[in-house]
Image (cartoon, grey):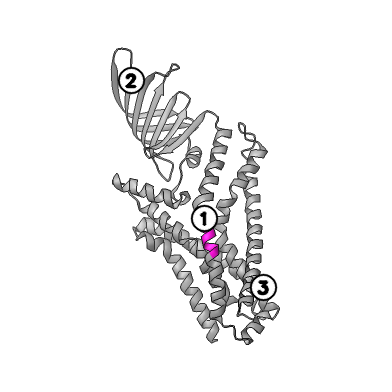
């Protein structure tokens, strides 16, 4: 039995690695095509574009590996069926439950590896990639994110933004303007900001404090036009969205938001998603098992792979859909993050039961 487990595990592992490599090559090609549009801006050259594509590989691996595990397991088991090896296993007394016990340990190893990639490698590589793009295309901007929000250096000004909306609107904007001798000239505080295009913002409810040699003057203005290199595309690079944060950072940031009585739903959903998502690898491999019962004339290897692709797409769509619905309808974060995985697990186990009794 151990020999059989090693053989099946080896077939699934090799097929999964092959599918993963193919998917990564495909997505890297698309990334390179997209990056070519930025080549020539500032110091951004083709070598930096290639480096950014390489640095994006861990994120693609994390997102694609459940689908790769599904397709790899489907392909390996379909090959066993096509070569009549699976029929021999069944005649020898290998039940679906035993095959499940062969697949699940391998899936758990995949899940742990996926979690480690998403927790440690992906945030680091993406941060390096985005900073690389920022430095190459916006040489006058230096930025860093702290608990107090995003800090950006723009020429002689330091900009602090505490909130960035989904539409790239700003909230809680502070602009510290210095002269050429590093003396503070003014501080402008705005309740909100809206991008108007061509590096121009419309700030609302502005209080500007001007520092002169002998006196300080505060002026309140309903609206102010503000020119800055800061734009929605740059904000997307600088701001770390919850879905890209590590579990440790999410836990810390959720605690910070609660201390300041701010909304935590999006970050909590992202946290539970990070914990549940690696288990999707196991669920996808379990889903592949019932297809191994299908006869070759029911679709063959190609048909099973097509079905696997549809299942993978369905899982991704369901995960994104429930994440958004959970945020809109204030569902419990664990339910919004974990229901698609639980649903597909129940579906896979039901299919196994039905195929076993057929």
**Closer to the camera, 34 or 352?**
352
Mark 3 / mark 1, whichever is N-terminal: 1
Q: Which residue is mark 2?
A: 210
Which quarter of the figure has residue 298? Answer: bottom right
Which quarter of the figure has residue 99? Answer: bottom right
Callout 3: helix, strand or loop? Answer: helix
Residue 301 badge = 3
Q: Give the main secondary structure, helix, strand or loop, of the magenta stretch.
A: helix
Q: Which residue is mark 1?
A: 116
Point 63% across, 64% down: residue = 16
Residue 129 badge = none
Q: Indicate the position of residue 345 as horizontal and vertical percent values.
A: 48, 71
Point 50% across, 57% down: residue = 115
Callout 2: helix, strand or loop? Answer: strand
- Marks 3 and 1 sit apart, C-alpha to C-alpha, by 32 Å
| Residues marked 3 and 1 touching at CB (< 8 Å) | no
Quadrant where the N terminus sits is bottom right
**Closer to the camera, 197 or 269?**
269
Mark 2 / mark 3, whichever is N-terminal: 2
Label 3 CA crowd tier, 10 Å (few <14, some 14–19, many 20+): many
- Marks 1 and 2 sit apart, C-alpha to C-alpha, by 50 Å
Q: Indicate the position of residue 319 as horizontal and vertical percent values.
A: 47, 61
Label 2 CA crowd tier, 10 Å (few <14, some 14–19, many 20+): some
| Residues marked 1 and 2 touching at CB (< 8 Å) | no
Q: Indicate the position of residue 179 as horizontal and vertical percent values.
A: 42, 18
Mark 1 / mark 2, whichever is N-terminal: 1
Task: Tell me if 95 is positioned left or right of 327 in this view.
Answer: right
Say whether residue 36 is magenta.
no
Stretch in magenta: 109-114
Quadrant where the C terminus sits is bottom right
Residue 38 against residue 104 in the figure, above or below: above
**Closer to the camera, 173 or 274?**
274
């Amino acid at each position: 039995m151990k020999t059989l487990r090693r053989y099946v595990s080896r077939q699934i592992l090799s097929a999964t690695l092959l599918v993963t490599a193919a998917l990564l090559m495909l997505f890297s090609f698309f990334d390179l095509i997209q990056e070519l549009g930025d080549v020539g801006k500032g110091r951004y050259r083709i070598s930096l574009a290639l480096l950014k594509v390489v640095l994006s590989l861990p994120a693609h691996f994390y997102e694609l590996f459940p689908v790769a595990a599904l397709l790899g397991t489907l392909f390996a088991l379909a090959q066993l069926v096509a070569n009549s090896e699976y029929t021999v296993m069944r005649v020898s007394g290998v039940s679906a439950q035993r095959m499940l016990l062969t697949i699940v340990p391998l899936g758990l190893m995949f899940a742990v590896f996926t979690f480690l990639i998403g927790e440690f490698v992906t945030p680091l590589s993406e941060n390096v990639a985005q900073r690389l793009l920022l430095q190459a295309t916006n040489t006058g901007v230096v930025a860093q994110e702290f608990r107090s929000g995003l800090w950006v250096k723009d020429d002689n000004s330091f900009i602090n933004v505490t909130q960035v909306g989904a539409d790239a609107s700003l909230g809680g904007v502070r602009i510290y303007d210095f002269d050429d001798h590093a003396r503070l000239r003014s501080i402008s505080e705005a309740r909100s900001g809206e991008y108007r295009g061509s590096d121009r913002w419309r700030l609302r409810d502005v209080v500007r404090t001007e520092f002169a040699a002998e006196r300080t003057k505060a002026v309140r203005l309903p609206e102010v036009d503000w020119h800055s290199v800061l734009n929605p595309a740059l904000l997307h690079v600088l701001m770390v969205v919850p879905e890209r944060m590590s579990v440790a950072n999410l836990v810390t940031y959720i605690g910070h938001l609660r201390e300041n009585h701010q909304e935590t739903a999006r970050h909590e959903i992202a946290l539970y998603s990070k914990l549940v998502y690696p288990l999707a690898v196991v669920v996808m491999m379990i889903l592949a098992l019932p297809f191994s019962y299908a006869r070759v004339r029911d679709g063959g290897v190609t048909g099973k792979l097509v079905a696997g692709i549809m299942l993978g797409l369905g899982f991704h769509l369901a995960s994104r859909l429930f994440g958004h619905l959970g945020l809109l309808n204030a569902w419990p974060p664990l339910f919004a993050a974990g229901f698609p995985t639980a649903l597909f697990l129940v579906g896979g186990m039901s299919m196994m039961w039905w195929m076993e009794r057929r």
